[in-house]
Amino acid sequence: MVADEDLWRYFAPDYVTARQRFLDASEKVNVEPTTLTLSVRGPSEENLSIDVVYLGPEKPNRLIIHTSGVHGVEGFPGSAVQVRLLERWAAGELKVPDDTGLIIAHAINPYGFAWLRRVNENNADLNRNFLPPGEEYVGEPEKYHELDDLLNPRTYNKPFDFFRIKSAFVILKMGFNVAKQTIAEGQYERPKALQFGGSELYEGPRKWVGYLEKILPSVDRVVWIDFHTGLGPFGVDSLLISGDDSEEELSRLKSHYGDTVQPNDPDAGVAYRIRGGMMNGVSSRWPEIDWTMITQEFGTVKPLQVIKSLRAENRMTHWSAIEERKKANSKERKHLVEVFSPSSDKWRSMIMFRGQELVDQAIDDLGKLSPEV
Ligand SMILES: [Zn+2]
């Protein structure tokens, strides 16, 4: 357990500090992290990188993957959980079987983390950017155009916006679940709009897939946890299952991980179906591996508040005259951080506890899936 007075050591004030703490923690486990550096820079001209620690044998049969920060600002709590994982490893409190490896990948979207956005340098949601090989970066949800004006105003500040009233009307007309699905699915037609999935597999994702290419050839089974925030009740995590979400598999996962396991079905729970998700995109490249893919989503504020904050931040980014570097200090970006990483000790403690517990459960699950050889 992490005491409240120690939380500040895990929840960093900015990307540079978070990264440094991750590197310091990896020194304690005597591992040289692999640094996948991007060609773009941060607001202080700092390098931006995905840093990956691998613990385990050279050619693992089984693998646990823990990723965070695919949504930029969600990297603040994600990094906190990962630094703690490394500390526990160093203290001998986190162990895996001899044939098992553990990958901890810090900041899949370091640009968004550093610039305080949820998207990357191309305005793309990277969890919509991993389309399976052969699938074209085109298309949008059927009703996206009906929401476009509401979600993506093409001016900066207007004194009266009426977003709440207008969205209430849309939700009434369209139905909450249809609206949720339409907003969240991902679109490949409007580069300045919300939920843009990109026009190609971008640099960070390409390098991350390239890293995995080196380690996956010997692997039979993977349990992958991708850490997220912004969906569900305050501080509580939902476990959204990608890949095999058959009744049989869901009931197996529920019996192991608990009742918060749910499929990515907009009518079944807090979730929604998406295109271009990272875990599906990666697993589709290695279909011979047995994948268990869990999106761990911690709730923060209500859905409409999340969308409102994303909309305001995106609007400021594309339609204000604010100078690029100053955008990182704007009220819209600060609000976005608060929405995805609330500065509440209660919330942070809940994240730290369940963030660790799920990894323990995953290690246990992987052990059960394939008996010791
Ligand atoms: Zn997320």
Image (cartoon, rainbow, N blue to C red):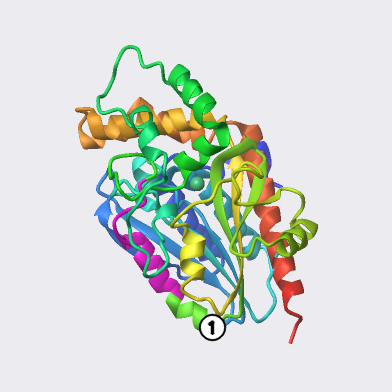
Q: Residue at x 72, y 59 (%)?
A: 250
Q: Position of residue 371 (x, y in %)?
A: 76, 80
Magenta-drawn segment:
196-212
Q: Amino acid at mark 1?
A: Glu
Q: Position of residue 110 (x, y in %)?
A: 38, 52
- Assess disc 1: are there few (<14), some (14-19) or many (≥20) residues with their C-alpha within 10 Å of its C-alpha: few
Give the residue number, with chain letter if any, for mark 1.
Answer: 58
- Is residue 16 toward the left or the right of residue 340 in the image? left
Q: Position of residue 320 (x, y in %)?
A: 23, 28
In what element is the residue under mark 1? loop
Q: Is residue 320 above or below residue 132?
A: above
Q: Residue at x 59, y 31 (%)?
A: 344
User: Residue furthest toward the right?
Assistant: 255
Q: Residue at x 42, y 39 (%)?
A: 143
Task: State how many labels appear.
Answer: 1
Q: Is residue 107 above or below residue 281?
A: above
Q: Position of residue 327 (x, y in %)?
A: 28, 33
Q: Quadrant of residue 252?
A: bottom right
User: Residue furthest toward the bottom?
Assistant: 373
Asked if one can make out residue 48 in the rendered structure from this viewpoint, the answer is yes
Q: Quadrant of residue 303?
A: top right
- Is residue 162 toward the left or the right of residue 199 in the image? right
Residue 84 lies in the magenta stretch: no
Q: Quadrant of residue 336?
A: top left
Q: Residue at x 30, y 47 (%)?
A: 189
Where's the C terminus, which quadrant? bottom right
Asked if one can make out residue 93 in the rendered structure from this viewpoint, the answer is no
Decide which of 240, 82 is in the foreground and name it. 240
Q: Is residue 141 above or below residue 225?
A: above
Decide which of 316, 115 is in the foreground and name it. 316
